[in-house]
Image: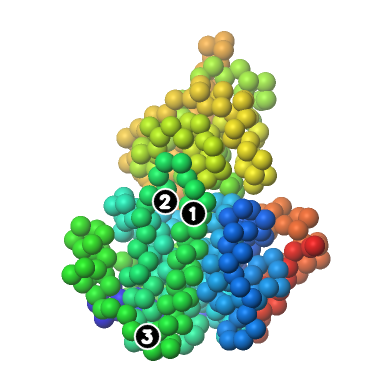
Amino acid sequence: MDATTLKLVDFAERLRFEDLPPAALEAAKARILSTLGVSLAAFETESVRSARAVAQPVAAGPQATVFGSTDKTTPEMAAFVNSAMVRSLDMSDSYVMSAVSHPADAFPSVLAVAEACRADGRALLLATALIYEVQCRFVEVVPYNHHGWDQTPVVALGAAIGCGRLLGLTREQLAHAISLAVVPNIALNQTRTGSLSMWKGMAGPQGARAGVFAVYLAKAGMTGPDGVFEGKFGFWNQLMDGEVFDVPIPDAAVTLANHTFAVQQTMIKSFPTRFNCQVPVFAAIELRNMLGVRGVRDIASLRIESIRKAFERWLDVPEVWNPQTRETADHSLPCTVAMGLLDGTITPKMMETGRYKDADVLALMRRCSIELPDEFDAVAPETRRCRLTATLKNGETRVVEYRRSLQDDAADSGWQHAVQKFGGLTTGLLDPAVQQKLISLISALDQQQEVASLVMLTALKR
């Protein structure tokens, strides 16, 4: 196996549940709860209905449950459908460095396999830490998005390693699973260009499905090509123009003593928008609070300053300034800022009902201009900044700047935020008693003897 594969296999084999500090465990539980909340809220979205339609029921062999139901399908299809729910609202957690990771996309893969093999809560938490560490450390240094490639193979990589650990694959089998997950699943970043389709939210789910499939293939004896990363036609040469990257996976047990795990560092989203639009929406809400509702109506022009790396390639895309799909709207800087200013929040319901097409939103967008200062880019992505300068009809100006750093993300486990988010997203979908039972179960997940009961509690009210 090549050097990168060896490093990944060594880490997956070496990491133990006991290596995870309390802060990492609480962070993992918070992200699991957030993930389930956004999943259930997306059960009836169009893309999820399409995904559910192809998940055939099974009565034999490994089985896993589709969130929101009691339907049993294969683990790979459960991973696909459930991950489609995770991504549909664009409200799961994110980690953006050299490239973009939505690590929760892979969580349904480890949950499906954990259910199928009757793993306990400790095993699921360990697998969750693995899928986060692998995906986030990869995107920390490998700018594959900027070379025109999408997230699918990185999600598949994380899923294969987490699921492989759950199924007890040997070192050789896990190396083959990594190869079988990555090599056949290279994806084009055309998915995130122009007017965005439903597949924008399915590239990650395809990776989750592929990772599960790869692990079961490897367990059954299937081999994959060597040189996944360093080979002549491997990832570095074919996708990254020959540049070799050292993925910063911890390589010695002593390193873990003071290690901050990736699952502690992702940002749990507050709004159903692209990661890089979260800080601008917070800035918009601050400006709204400063101006009041009447003051927002008096804005003659609005200058938005944000990060060049995040938004430069979108500025001249016509669809960004006149979004016709929710997938385009939730990636549009002027649209999300306008909605935040006008309504004081952005909710899944607003996206579902096409709030982004309303006349007042479009009118405010037309009064917006965007600048991408060097000073903002200099501190990104470690610190995300957005400055809004509103010029009112009477000539007065009001300025708000909002910042958030990686240290801010890691300082709080996110548990209370996840509890509030889960409650808000599942009200009306689950009985209050079931909501509380799920929260309590996840809070004590490391004490659970099996995870099947967790999934069964997600069955929605009919």
Query: Dot 1: few (<14), some (14–19), or many (≥20) neighbours within 10 Å?
Result: some
Residue 432's x, y, as percent? 80, 61
Q: Residues within 10 Å of mark 2 (few under 14, many from 20)?
A: many
Q: Are marks 3 and 1 in contact (CB under 8 Å)?
A: no
Q: Earlier in the sequence, mark 2 or mark 3?
A: 2
Taking the image as shown, residue 434 lies to the left or right of residue 211, namely right
Write the residue at 56% across / 23% down: 363
- Where is residue 289, by image quadrant? top right
Count of numbered tags: 3
Residue 389 visible in the shown view: no
Q: Amino acid at mark 3?
A: Met
C-alpha gap between disc 3 and disc 1: 29 Å
Q: Earlier in the sequence, mark 3 or mark 1?
A: 1
Spatial CA span between label 2 and label 3: 30 Å
**Category of crowding for the residue at label 3, using alpha-carbon neighbours closer than 10 angstroms: few (below 14), some (14–19), many (at least 20):** some
Residue 272 versus residue 122: which sits nearer the camera? 272
Q: Tell me the amino acid under the disc marked 1.
A: Trp
- Amino acid bearing label 2: Thr
Q: Which residue is mark 1?
A: 199
298 versus 149 height, above or below: above
| C-alpha gap between disc 2 and disc 1 | 7 Å
Q: Residue at x 59, y 35 (%)?
A: 356
Q: Which residue is mark 2?
A: 191
Q: Nearer the viewer, residue 292 or 254?
A: 292
Residue 175: give x, y in percent of width and height: 34, 81
